[in-house]
Image (spheres, rainbow, N blue to C red):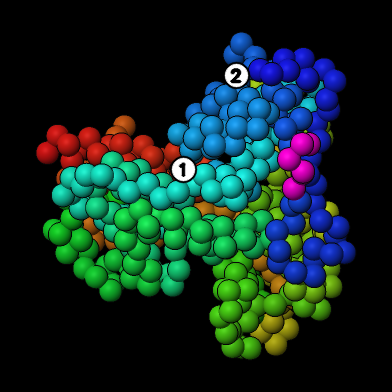
Amino acid sequence: MGNPKAFLTIHRKEAGYRPVSDRIRDYGEVEQTLNPEDRRLQASRCMECGVPFCHWSCPLGNKQPEWQDRLFKNDIKGAYTLLTATDDFPEFTGRVCPALCEKGCVLNKIHEPVTIRENEAAIVERAFLEGYVRPYVPKHRTGKRVAVIGSGPAGLACANQLNRRGHSVTVFEKNEAIGGLLRFGIPDFKLNKSIIDRRVALMTEEGVEFKPGVEVGKDIAVEDIVRDYDAVCIAIGAEVPRDLKVEGRDLKGVHFALELLQQQNRVNAGREISRDDRISAKGKNVLVIGGGDTGSDCVGTANRQGALSVTQIEIMPKPPEGENPATPWPYWPVVLKTSSSHDEGCNRRWLLDTRRIIGENGKVTEVEVEEVRWEKDEATGRMNLIHTGNVERIKAELVLLAMGFTNPVQDGILKQLGVDKDARGNVKVDDKQQSSIDKVFAAGDASTGASLVVRCIASGRKAAEGIHNYLTEK
């Protein structure tokens, strides 16, 4: 490193967010950027420690110390080359990854890890700005054709890697635009969709063929895909949301989280939604059921729509703040996470179980919840949910279910293909990401269940390697 002792004198400095009063008026990205000199100083804080736990923590195996050094030395081209050697889309992970690497950073022992995620985003943006990102068109084509079904992070990563190996890749996407969960699930205030468009345009120049608005199994027969292509990758995600089977679930005003998020992203893109179909939090008391990132995205979206109040409830206990002895460094710390959306206005509550949804004239008006506690069964070691009998009602005219996802939709492509599934209903794959059907592979959430964008990219890269080896051996 150029300055191996920088971490002793330079403190962690985050770019921070736009002021709340400003950002809740629009859907622009909330995160700000540091100037290049401050960013260099942040990169200099990397200790290049003997055992880089940042590298160990990253599902992609990113070589953080190496590209931090390049950034510090203002070698943006070199930094970008190192970064993209392991991460196909650092412009995505640099914005929406929870930064597992930072939790493993040795400096996280003193709660001042290197700003790895922000540095990553800064590298890729400067690389685009300074003209270092150019189309890579393979000099030789293998003559092999691969179909990728789904254009989320896993499908895009798989397509990118296969195309660069010289195979001809066609990506099928059932929605009207490419991006999958990146485009329709993640709010614009976290990931501006022009970032996706820029990457898709680059991949198109490189030779990848994209077919949006084409649903395999409906618009084109599954058997035709399997017959006409030398290999197929299923990257359709885990689209089945966890439902809440309680009285009043069918009342008007109760929606899955993605119904709201997808619709708002489409509205932002210029799509017209009829008044009857529009989901809006304007002037309403909003209740978000589920304490994860998707729930947080609902909070931010509801605030931007003009919600009267937003409450987010979680059935699990409130995590400890700062330190958690149960999850010590360098493991992922289970501690309280406060997002930019929470800072915009949200009443957060824990240890509440939804018992029933109450309404008038077919519309939701309240949600009855019961306080719970968790007790450990000494015989089995498992935690058991105990209902206390303490019941209350929360006023709500809009209820959003953000309790995660289970598995891919089973009555579509998977059913027609007849692939084996695991106990959770995901596509069962081997260590090469190959399914039980010859030349059919799977990647991302379709094979693992709902996960992180960074894990999906890693899975897509692994599937591409498996497909490439399969085609080469053939």
- What secondary structure is found at the residue carrying circle 1? loop
Q: Earlier in the sequence, mark 2 or mark 1?
A: 2
Magenta includes 35?
A: yes
Q: Is residue 386 above or below residue 53?
A: below
The quarter of the displayed image where residue 55 is located:
top right
Q: Position of residue 179 (x, y in %)?
A: 47, 60
Disc 1 marks which residue?
Answer: 88
Alpha carbon distance from label 2 to label 1: 21 Å
Q: Position of residue 137 (x, y in %)?
A: 33, 48
Number of numbered discs overlaid on the protein picture: 2
Magenta includes 77?
A: no
- What secondary structure is found at the residue carrying circle 2? loop
Query: What residue is at 80 percent from the left and 66 percent from the top?
Result: 24
In the displayed structure, does residue 11 sit left or right of residue 414? right
Three-letter amino acid code at the position of disc 1:
Asp
Q: Which residues are magenta?
A: 33-38
